[in-house]
Amino acid sequence: MQLKELFSDKSLKPKERTEKLAKLVTEKVIIPENLIDYAKTAKDPVKATCIESLEFATAAEPSIMTSKAFLAVLGFLDEKAPRVKWESAKVTANCIHLFPEHIETAVKKLLDNTECPGTVVRWSAATALSQIIKLKTPINSHLIPAVESIAASEEKNSIKKIYADAIKKVKNRNI
């Protein structure tokens, strides 16, 4: 099935479309690069749906993500549309362990998103940053103080908890 056909099928509800697309990616009928290429030229709602389907697929099977597609997802963290940002952060959280060479780029973009007015964008950025912290890479020497500072000024307790849990897990392993 072609992506254009899938998105023009009015019989599918948005959630059904996302789930169908995620299944096609998981089954390797659609490869992540093709989905990303389609998303790059699409309007924000379609782009976000493409990324959300990658989020579902990589939650089940992170290894389907390729380096090229992952780099594009990191690029989407800079988009203006909040849903594109938060779906990209979720994919990053699912896959960052497979691409340690891109941690610095991911951290920079995710830290920028912690200042976003949208709660879901900040929550998703916190989730991805917490996954990076749990990898215990040398970047933690700078990242942990940064997220501690962010958490101190964060208004939402749910987001503060994400940071606190990640830091606690890393520090408990060091004891």
Image (cartoon, rainbow, N blue to C red):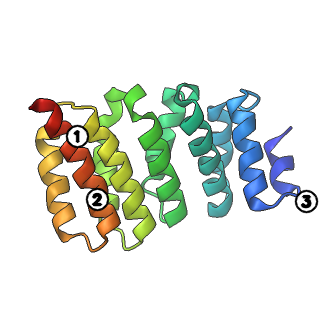
- Using the rendered image of the protein, determine whether residue 79 is visible from the camera's viewpoint: yes
Mark closer to the chain start, 2 or 3: 3
Q: How far apart are marks 2 and 3 (CA)?
A: 40 Å
- Using the rendered image of the protein, determine whether residue 139 is visible from the camera's viewpoint: no
Left or right placement of residue 14 versus residue 165 in this view:
right
Q: What residue type is labelled 2?
A: Lys
When the figure is inspected, residue 5 is found, relative to residue 44, above or below; the finding is above
Image spot of residue 128 (x, y percent): 37, 47
Image spot of residue 97 (x, y percent): 38, 30
Mark closer to the chain start, 3 or 1: 3
- Crowding near the residue tagged with mark 2, few <14, some 14–19, many ≥20 C-alpha atoms within 10 Å: few
Provide the secondary structure element on which disc 1 rests.
helix
Q: Which of marks 3 and 1 is in front?
A: 1
Image spot of residue 17 (x, y percent): 77, 52
Residue under label 2, please give it.
161
Residue under label 1, please give it.
169
